[in-house]
């Protein structure tokens, strides 16, 4: 037997093996391998737990998490201002002394404590590298679109309808309050229709001492603050009503 005959026999043997494997693949029924079961539909947890963890408002923010900690600092949050157009968010926060200050994101509230983020009902503060939450006290809050009762301290008024600069000028009279030869605020009175006066939540005799976190030293200061706001933003106003200091908030509408 020569070398060529041996090669032919090897090729015929390989061909026979392949034909046998093909025949076996054709006649063998196809079926599952091993133990198998149809997967049953299910949920990762009980339905009650899933509903509790669902937020219909989709309030997802890097500053808020499920494991957030409410701060133990003696701070009081009176109101927040969220300006989606410019991103210049701020909040009205009072310390243990009760003095209210307008603080912008990134500014220091107290030594080692900075304002990190602002939401509609709370703020996140950075306390020596640790994020903590501070919420608005709504135990005595009033519905949106109404004003707080006279003499009720610490209640922020947020008006959904809003006002524009021309309404403020036509419906509110601003009279400078002079103390020691300088203007320390603007006394407000209703005039014209008085619609904007009531919308903002003013009472006759209120003294506007700050707007947008800036002290008022004249009527031009208030005009400058209002004209610098974009439609849809909220303006925080601090007023003196008798012996009390009250925060008010009003939405600015387009002209």
Image (cartoon, grey):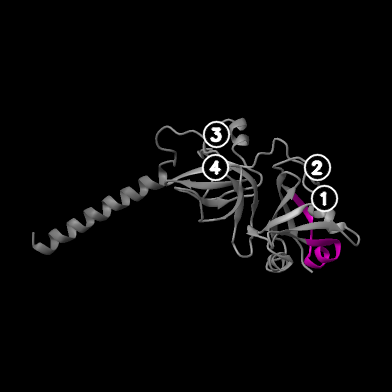
- How far is disc 1 from disc 2 in space, using C-alphas? 8 Å
**Label 3 near label 2: C-beta < 8 Å?**
no
**Tag in front: 3 or 4:** 4
The residue tagged 1 is 203
**Mark 2 or mark 3, which has the lower sequence index?**
3
**Label 2 near label 1: C-beta < 8 Å?**
yes
Label of residue 150 in the image: 2
Q: In the picture, which quadrant includes the C terminus?
A: bottom right
Label of residue 133 in the image: 4
| Front residue of 189 and 39 | 189
Left or right: 210 as drawn, with respect to 104 = right
**Label 4 near label 3: C-beta < 8 Å?**
no
For label 1, the crowd category at 10 Å Cα-Cα, with few meaning under 14, some 14 to 19 and many 20 or more, is some
Q: In the picture, which quadrant includes the N terminus?
A: bottom left
Q: Position of residue 94 (x, y in %)?
A: 60, 45
Q: Is mark 1 on a helix, strand or loop?
A: loop
> Which residues are the magenta region?
158-175
**Mark 3 or mark 1, which has the lower sequence index?**
3
Q: Where is residue 93 in the image (x, y as percent from the top left)?
A: 60, 47
Q: Which residue lies furthest to the front in this view?
A: 180
- How far is disc 3 from disc 4 in space, using C-alphas? 41 Å
- How far is disc 4 from disc 1 in space, using C-alphas? 33 Å
Label of residue 144 in the image: none
Q: Position of residue 173 (x, y in %)?
A: 83, 62
| Front residue of 64 and 48 | 64
């Amino acid at each position: 037997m020569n070398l060529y005959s041996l090669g032919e026999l090897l090729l015929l043997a390989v061909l026979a093996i392949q034909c046998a494997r093909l025949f076996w693949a054709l006649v063998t029924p196809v079926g599952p391998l091993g133990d198998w079961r149809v997967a049953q539909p299910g949920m990762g947890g009980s339905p009650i737990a899933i509903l509790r963890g669902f937020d219909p408002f989709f309030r997802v923010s890097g500053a808020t998490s499920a494991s957030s900690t409410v701060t133990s600092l003696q701070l009081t949050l009176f109101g927040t201002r969220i300006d989606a157009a410019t991103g210049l968010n701020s909040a009205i926060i009072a310390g243990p002394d009760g003095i209210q200050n307008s603080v912008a994101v990134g500014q220091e509230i107290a030594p080692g404590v900075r304002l990190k983020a602002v939401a509609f009902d709370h703020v996140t503060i950075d306390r020596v590298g640790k994020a903590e939450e501070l919420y608005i006290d709504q135990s005595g809050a009033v519905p949106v679109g109404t004003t707080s009762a006279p003499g009720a301290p610490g209640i922020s008024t947020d008006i959904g309808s809003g006002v524009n600069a021309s309404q403020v000028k036509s419906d509110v009279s601003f009279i400078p309050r002079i103390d020691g030869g300088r203007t320390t605020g603007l006394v407000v009175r209703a005039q014209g229709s008085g619609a904007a006066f009531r919308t903002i939540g003013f009472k006759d005799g209120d003294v506007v001492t700050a707007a947008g976190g800036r002290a008022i030293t004249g009527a031009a200061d208030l005009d400058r603050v209002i004209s610098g706001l974009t439609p849809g933003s909220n303006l925080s106003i601090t007023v003196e009503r008798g012996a009390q200091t009250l925060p008010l908030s009003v939405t600015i509408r387009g002209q």
